[in-house]
Image: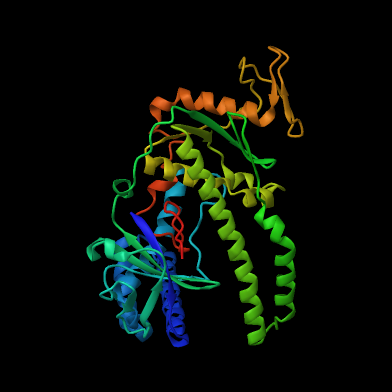
Amino acid sequence: MITLEFKLKGNKQQFLAIDEAIRTVQFVRNKCVRLWMDSKGIGKKDIYRYTTELRKEFKYVEALNSSACQQAGERAWSSIAKFYDNCKKKVKGKKGYPKFKKNVRSVEYKQSGWKLSDNRKKITFTDKNGIGTLTLKGGWDLNFYPIDQIKRVKIVRRADGCYAQFAINIDVREYVKQLEPTQDCIGIDVGLKYFYADSKGNTVPVPQYYRKAEKQLNRANRKKSKKFCKGQKQSNNYLKARNRYARKHLRVSRQRKGFVQREALRVIQSNDLVAYEDLKVKNMVKSKLSKSINDASWSAFRSWLEYFGWKYGKVTVAVPPYNTSQNCSNCGEKVKKSLSTRTHKCPHCGFEADRDLNASLNILQLGLRTAGHAGTYAWGETPSWAFGEILMSNGDSLNQESPRL
């Protein structure tokens, strides 16, 4: 499954119709969650039947394509199923109890409700919302793929416009040239001083896109706040300021995503085996270093490593992070050190190296030990690239290359 993205070009009325369709999806999704909260023993089929009842009860829901309404029910059930799964696994802390969405940004159609033009440069949405025909702007060629392989079409609203995402059911590995073996293995230790340090002694600095743009973001946020009128309908000046603020955040997000993609692809192309720590970033961001950790995008980097490794037939191994910085990579003895200690000095064997280099060597050793079990991941969880059958609710697809518009 791959995802191709195009920017949509149309008039103001068409984009207002898209906004109405997105609000309808939010309404249906929240109503399904409310039904589950108020009733016991509600299952997936009951959610689907309820979306049909909503179409009969509300005219604006009926105007939306039936497959889009059903997909809104799928979103509700996805959050419910995740909550059940966390309860069964006895996840510590909050279990992710389903909440009502306040700012849905996408509407998703299955194989009905839309039609491509003969030259595949335009798309027409055929439901009663009045979206009509929109022009597709992008560098991809949809003529290469049969229509029956396009399983879903999603309209995503972002700060700089609306985009159409096409989920195409193909095995991307059949269309890429497999890389020649490099006979190299590498261990990677991610951090805040360096984005990562590898077992070969190479380091990549952290770009800190958010830190560099923080002054501009704060300035734009203050301008937006000054135009906010509590308890009143917001002015056009406020809406413009809010959009400028959102566009700056979107730019930082795209810079960060492009950086981790390039680095992950470079690492996969240069090595046959890549070992990295199986960090629980969700727990780590609860500390005072949360802003720096989020800016480093460790989770996104790992996701792209796994995806490119799967795509190009390279081995990626996640290893437990216990004591990778404390143990000596030369003799294996434990040498305790604080976070401020940046040099590893082993009193047992005399080995001395940079802290991050020592950690990356330990990670590589652990990765090589488990290379024969590469299909089993450190915590027994499914790798992130395996979740590609359904587009993410925020309009992103973690396991596909970013589109070039």
Residue ID at (75%, 79%): 226
Q: Quadrant of residue 9?
A: bottom left
User: In this rendering, is residue 274 above or below 388?
Assistant: above
Rendered location of residue 276, percent (x, y): 53, 35
Residue sitting nearer the eye, 19 or 45: 19
Q: Residue furthest right?
A: 340
**Residue 90 showing in the rendered view:** no
| 285 vs 86, nearest the viewer | 285
Residue 2, quarter of the rendered image = bottom left
Q: Nearer the viewer, residue 269 or 242?
A: 269
- What is the number of callouts on the image? 0
Q: Residue at x 41, y 78 (%)?
A: 21
Which quadrant holds residue 236?
A: bottom right
From the viewer's perspective, is 78 left or right of 354? left
In the image: residue 356, left or right of residue 303: right
Where 363 sits versus 396, above or below?
above
Percent of width and height locating residue 130: 36, 85
Question: Residue at horizontal 41%, vertical 47%?
Answer: 385
Task: Give x and y (percent) for residue 61.
Answer: 36, 80
Name of the residue lying farthest toward the top: 349
The quarter of the rendered structure image containing the N terminus is bottom left
Above or below 31: residue 180: above
Give x and y (percent) for residue 356: 65, 31
Above/below status of 243 relative to 334: below
Tell me if I can see residue 200 in this picture: yes
Q: Is residue 365 left or right of 203 when viewed as pictured?
A: left
Which of the pair 296/261 is nearer the observer? 261
Residue at horizontal 23%, vertical 63%?
146
